[in-house]
Amino acid sequence: MAFPGAHTLLDYNAPFDVPMLDQIITAFYTPGADPTMRSEAEKVMTSLQEHEMMWTRADAILEQSSNPNTKFFALQVLEGVIKYRWNALPDDQREGIKNFISNLIIKLSTDAVSFRRDRAFINKVNAVLVQILKHDWPVRWASFVPDLVGAAKQSESLCENCMNILRLLSEEVFDFSRGELTQAKITELKNALNTDFPLIHDLCEFVLTHSQKSELIQKTLQTLHAFLSWIPLGYIFESSLLDTLLKLSPNPEFRNVALQCLGEIGGLAVEPKYDTHFVTLYVTVITQLQTILPRTVKIAEAYANGSDDEQAYIQNLAIFLTQFFKHHIALLETTPENQQHLLVGVEYLLNISYTDEPEVFKVCLDYWHVLVCDLYQSNGDANAGGGGEFSFAPAGNGGGGGGGGGSTRRMMYAGSMSQLRLLMVSRMAKPEEVLIVEDENGNIVRETLKDNDVLVQYKIMRETLIYLAHLDHKDTETQMLSKLSNQLNGKEYSWNVLNTLCWAIGSISGSMAEDQENRFLVTAIRDLLNLCEVTRGKDHKAVIASNIMYVVGQYPRFLRLHWKFLKTVVNKLFEFMHETHPGVQDMACDTFLKIAIKCKRKFVIMQVGEHEPFVDELLRSIGETIRDLEPHQIHTFYEAVGHMIASEVNPAKREEYVQRLMDPPNQTWNAIMATAKAQGADSLKPQEVIKNLGNILKTNTSACVSLGQPFQNQMSSIFADVLNVYKLYSELISQSIAEGGPYASRTSLVKAMRTVKREVLRLVETFVERCEDPHLVAQQLVPPMMDPVLGDYARNVPDARDAEVLSLYAAIINKVEGAMIDEVPKIFEAVFECTLQMITVNFEDFPDHRLKFFSLLRAITNHCFRALFTLAPDQLKLVVDSIVWAFRHTERNIAETGLNLLLEMTKFFQVSEFCNQFHQSFYLSLIQEIFAVMTDGFHKPGFKLHALLLQNLFTIAESESLSAPLWDVSAKGPGGYQNNAAFVKEHVSNLLTTSFPNMSIAEATVLVQGMFDYKSDLTLFKNHLRDFLVQTKQFKTSDNSAMFAEEQAARQSAERARVDAIPGMLPPNQIDMGDD
């Protein structure tokens, strides 16, 4: 053993060997130590931590050891017992720990030298004290705050630490308590803090007015900052606190934290009687600001060259201004004098918005979005007629129908809003559709990864710019077009300026009146096309091309009204399809698809001045158009043309177009099939042929996606060959595996053949989903696939089974519903057990099979439920076990599929004649499994579904549809319990007390009774469950936001609906324009 004598550390009758523990912990923490020694040390430390009496050694370790890591180890042990076993300790032991920690804090904090030296250790001791307070204060330690305030007056270092403890306590109660403490405990602690606040307030006032020590003043201000969001308002506005903060705010030493405090106050929404205080606060800060940071200073430059402290000041200033304006801007709009101060603040915020620091810009942008939305609504445009009847009168005309107040406000902010438009245009974020970016070396490249932060920022900036456009369309148009003409004449030309400008032009689509949009776009697109003609250099052309494609893709309404422009644009896209610069072809195909979806009818009708519909011309030259495209781009192209053809109303003409569209891939397919018939199966083995077949199948799938039912004849013509190819490759794969063993499934040849098989399955699945004739699917597609697809799946080795088989049969059942009921036993036989064996070995292998398997089960449950009744009991048990396996999964979408499936299945069984048998077999095990995943801390996102399932199971226990006893009748007799509800309450109470030793039988009984009492109201039921989870101590020190996700989603959805009603807010690709 690496540490002889280490076993004596667990002997609680002998004195504790602190030097030995020091030696073990040093071995564990020393960098580059011997791995064996380290592993031994870890084992000893774990066994000590897990011993229930180890906490009794903490005082000896903390007093005798001089090793910081050993001391932290002792505090961790102590913190563990306080968090999880505090209420189970006898009173005298609790008092002992409390006194020991209090005395240790006083001892460490009284001496200024040790207080500075051991800061990290003292912070940890403070955290332990706060854990005790969360249990004992105020009931068992009512004198805590008076004791602390009394101690604080003994020395300045002790006072500083008292401030730290108060700040920690406030944060624990007000900021981090959700999901950590029960609702009742949170209320109790908040009330206690409010009751004791006069003492804390007096202490803070005393320090701020009398102390000369800057560290102590800093700490006091930080503590106040934590308190300001909840303290009674009288302490802010009716005492000298606000004056004190305003006196400290110009002082370079304190201005950052003082401004944070003032920002917190500025963000309080309170009753009108304090309005004058808010005006005084704002005017004082703005007056001081003009001395600290004169208005002439370019803040973006000052920030770039400033110290950390100066940068923090600008960040805090942005937070102060945005918080204050959000809550009190109306107070500053009342008198001309206040309006002047207000506009100075807006000017500062505009300057700060140019700072090249993402976090600062986010704070500013968030407020600009709020302000323009507020101006838009007060302007009256928000209430204008639903038919897009907007007033585009200039600012002075009081346009917008919002009465005098709205237009006066608009005039007041007109100058600032014009500057804001310029800011938005020059800093516009990149939209998702743009694939061409400038890399860090200044080269133009294809984007490889999406940046989600940029996409979120684009969404907010787009909405802000749309509001700004509604406030003054003329100014928006003038600014954008003048910037564009500066690109053409070379005054401002740069990639970045052109990009942000075009992204801004594209983002305001739909916000203008039709005639204005037409005028604006004709100029914008003409200028961009001219710029493309006159500019030389591949990179320049690529940037301009990407911008043209983005802008035209955003304005389908304009293109639908202007055939000449639409034709020019599409021909330009065809031109870009030959441009091999990375990303240009991709964007050309994506934009073509977007335009084809929105303007599909325009391409199949005869346009004025044309001698044939555009689609005829397109199909005639299709080979030339797609000559330089990669296979994946060709698939996008085919999907786009499919949308056009599907909009043709004449069936004969539509059929002719489909044949002409599919002619190029069909020729290649037929040639390969003819060779195979003449030369035998060997001709299908070369990699090139396999690759060709895969691409042809993908092309068919893409066309099928957009064509839907009109694809039927093409599908019928190739279906037999497609199945033969599937069979042949299945046999070749099985043969390779039989000869080469399981590893043969990983060779490049087998992988390529499997790709073709998967494409066959995807093509059939796509056709099934898009087909409008379920009878056709059931009669013509399903029977021929039984053995080639299902039989092959069952016969193959696990590595060669395709998950797409599962999703194909799920799609078939979803399409033909009950007509598949006779086939379900065959499907079960082929896929069920063999797939379960693959996915229940662990949680990692075969991820695709997992999700698709449970989707198939869901389809069967929802559409062929009665087929489950034909299963033998052990097969039904296998089904339920597989669902339990799914919701135990830590992969969120698999767990959610499993929970939804179980919810649907239990509801179906509850109204069937098999209700009793099902619940007698599975009720108790399901209750146990759901509680297990709900309390393990790994499945919090499933909380809503856990609650629904438990609510459902508790309801059925009391319902008449469940008439058989759930308890073991052979052991307890038929009258063992009064009813099922009484048995379930006792069973669940026992389950909880055995699972959570810290929970008494009385507590468990109250909790379970509550679950039964609240089961008819889901909101109360979920709150009760959240309190239960806090009491199990399973939700400690981790992110609990997932438990509240449902409420958050409901709030967001309501806000979204309001915003989407504003013209231009819904992106053009999300608007259903119908057929023109």
Image (cartoon, rainbow, N blue to C red):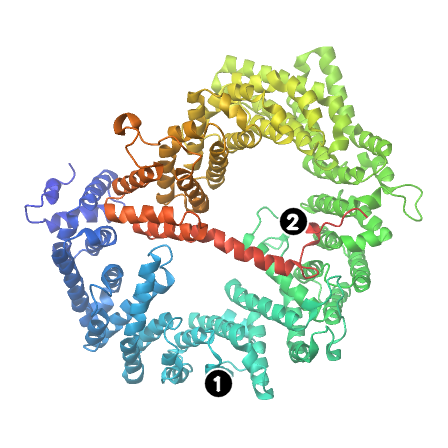
Vertical order, 292 against 126 (above or below): below
Question: Which residue is more in the foreground, 78 or 421?
Answer: 78
Circle 2 packing at 10 Å, graded few (<14), some (14-19), many (20+), is: many
Query: Is 953 positioned to the left or the right of 1059 in the image?
Result: left
Q: Residue at x 82, y 46 (%)?
A: 571
Under circle 1, the secondary element is: helix
* Image quarter of residue 615: top right
Name the element at disc 2.
loop
Nearer to me, 211 or 578: 211
Seen in the picture, residue 72 relative to 114 is either above or below; the reply is above
| Residue underneath mark 1 | 276
Relative to 733, does residue 531 appear above or below in the rendering?
Answer: below
Where is residue 539? Give x, y as percent.
70, 52
Mark 2 — residue?
Answer: 435
In front of the other: label 1 or label 2?
Answer: 1
Q: Residues within 10 Å of mark 1 (few under 14, many from 20)?
A: few
Q: Would residue 1035 be seen by someone viewing this image from the given angle?
A: no
Could you tell whether 267 is left or right of 627 in the image? left
Q: Nearer the viewer, residue 330 or 1069?
A: 330
Q: CA distance from mark 1 to mark 2?
A: 52 Å
Image-quadrant location for residue 400: bottom right
Please give the count of numbered marks on the rendered protein: 2
Q: Position of residue 191 (x, y in %)?
A: 32, 68
